[in-house]
Image (cartoon, rainbow, N blue to C red):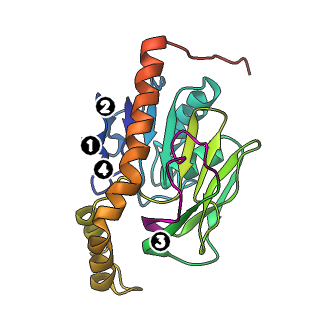
Amino acid sequence: MTVVEHEAEAGLGFFGGWLDDVVVFRPYLGEAVPDDPGDGLLVLGGAASAWQDDDYPWLPATRALLRTAVEREVPTLGICLGAQLMTLACGGEVVRGVNGLEVGVGEVVPLVNDDPLLGHLTRPAPAIQYHQDAMTVLPDGAVLLATGTQYPHQAFRIGRRAWGVQFHPEATPAIFEQWTTELTTHPAEELNKQVSAVEAGLVASWRPLAEAFGAIVAENARSGSITVRNH
C-alpha cells in the first residue's frame, strides 16, 4: 500500500498497527510523490491547505496521484488533508471553513449501513478532529457517508473504491497532544484529556475501518483488478 505522509507529526498512528505492507513516501523530506498508486493508496493529513502549493510544492503531484487512483478504481483513502486533496483533484471545492476550527473529540454520524468501510457503524461514533478548511462541494457522483454538527461532509465515497474522511481515524491521543502544543484558541489540556478518555471508543470505531480498507487493498493486489479509463 502506498502512503503519502505530509509531516512527521501526522503519521500512521493507530494505522501503523492495523495495516500491513505499507510503503511510506515523505515528500516533506524531499522524497518524490510516486506516479503510480500501486495496489492501494492512503494519503494522510497535515497542516497545509489543499491549495497551498507554493508552501508545499508536492501537493500538485499528490492531487494528480489521487486523481489517477480514483480513475483507475484503485482502493484509496484520504484522511483530512488527504480527503480535501482528493476533493479538489476530482472537481469538488475546499475552502477555509466558516464555522472555525473543529478540534478535539467530535461525533461522526453515519448515514448509510452498507458501505464497506463505514457500514459497521450503527450509531454516532467519537472521532478526533483537527481542521479549519472544509469540503463545501463534493465531487460529482460522490456519496455522503457520514456527517457532523460543525461541518457536514465528514465521510464520502467516490465510485466503489475511493473514500475521504474529514476526521482522523488514525490519530492516537499521543499524536493529538503533539498537535495541540501550540494551540492558543482552545483549552489544549482539556481537549487532550477528552481525547484520552475516549481512546477505547476510537479503537472500537476505527480499527474496523482500517482493517476493511486493508482487506480491500489486499484483494486488489491478489486480483489485479484495476480499471483504466481513458480521459
Distance from Cα at disc 1 to Cα at disc 4: 8 Å
Q: Is residue 64 left or right of residue 180?
A: right
Look at the numbered discs 1 and 4 and tell me whether their residues touch, using CB distance below 8 Å: yes
Which sits earlier in the primary sequence, circle 3 or circle 1? 1
Distance from Cα at disc 3 to Cα at disc 2: 28 Å
User: Residue 22 got which mark?
Assistant: 2
Foreground: 138 or 194?
Answer: 194
Marks 1 and 4: which is nearer the front?
A: 1
User: Residue 11 got which mark?
Assistant: 4
Residue sitting at x 72%, y 46%: 139
Mark 1, other Cα within 10 Å: few <14 / some 14–19 / many ≥20:
few
Look at the numbered discs 1 and 2 and tell me whether their residues touch, using CB distance below 8 Å: yes
Secondary structure at numbered mark 4: loop
Look at the numbered discs 2 and 4 and tell me whether their residues touch, using CB distance below 8 Å: no
Which sits earlier in the primary sequence, circle 1 or circle 4? 4
| Amino acid, disc 3 | Gly
| Amino acid, disc 4 | Gly
